[in-house]
Image (cartoon, rainbow, N blue to C red):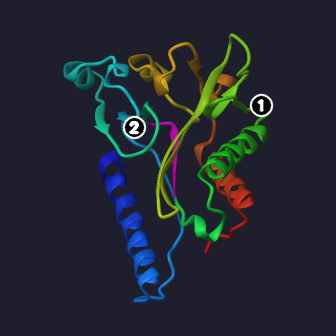
Amino acid sequence: MDYKEAWDYQETLFAKNIALKIEHRNGTSTEPTTNHLLFVEHPHVYTLGKSGSESNLLLDEAGLEAHHASYYKINRGGDITYHGPGQLVAYPIFDLDYFFTDIHKYMRYLEEAVIQTLKEYGIEGCRSEGLTGVWIEPETPRARKICAMGVKSSRWVTMHGIGFNVNSDLSYFSHIVPCGIDDKAVTSMQHELGKPVDMQEVKQLLKAKLAEQFGYTYQ
């Protein structure tokens, strides 16, 4: 799905939950908020978060066109990242009042679900001190990022989420300073394992690991 189309869909779900929470507070509605998990692959796109610098995009308009990529400034935290075919993007639209009201903990739970998914393939994913996302060999000169994260939350409702490199074309990362970090590489499951990975299988695993982390069931 096109990035903007998916973003608009997220915004619709997000706005409905926010409106319901305001109505709950005002005593004008008892309709429950809802939780959604969206999985999508985007055409080539670069997105810049609120705290990012445009200088971290190394392509001009002609360069974007030549690489068939689009570019959006968006309302999540974090710097610049890339999404494209072969990358599993997960957008949890969660009302954290159902779980816990702690964004730091929320990010760690997202990371843990990815770490546990990688484990099923014999890949050791880790956290890197002071940085978000999931890394491989983070404390070594070979440190490389396999999953980026950026979220927005309001009234404890979340949107945006994770970009998990499954079979991503890693050459697209060479046109940005990924997440504003210029001294660490980016990798994918395909690159680590030396062969393409079944995307449907990864989706099913990540779905299960997220449910385990947050203690929910799917309707």
Q: Residue drawn at (41%, 69%), measured in percent from left and top?
A: 18
On screen, residue 115 versus residue 191, left or right, reads right
Instruction: Give residue 83's quadrant in the image.
Output: top left
Dot 2 amino acid type: Gly
Q: Is residue 132 magenta?
A: no
Q: Residue at label 1? A: 124
Which segment is the magenta one?
85-92
On screen, residue 156 versus residue 143, left or right, reads left
Dot 1 amino acid type: Glu
Q: Position of residue 77 (x, y in %)?
A: 45, 41
Mark toward the start of the polypeptide (1 vs 2): 2
Mark number, residue 27: none
Say which of marks 1 and 2 sits in front. Answer: 2
Describe the element under mark 2 as helix, strand or loop: loop
In-front residue for pair 15/41: 15
- Residue 172 higher or lower than 17, as above or below: above
* Residue 196 appears in view: no
Residue placed furthest toward the front: 26
On screen, residue 183 versus residue 142, left or right, reads left
Q: Residue at label 2? A: 49
Q: Residue drawn at (59%, 64%), measured in percent from left and top?
A: 96
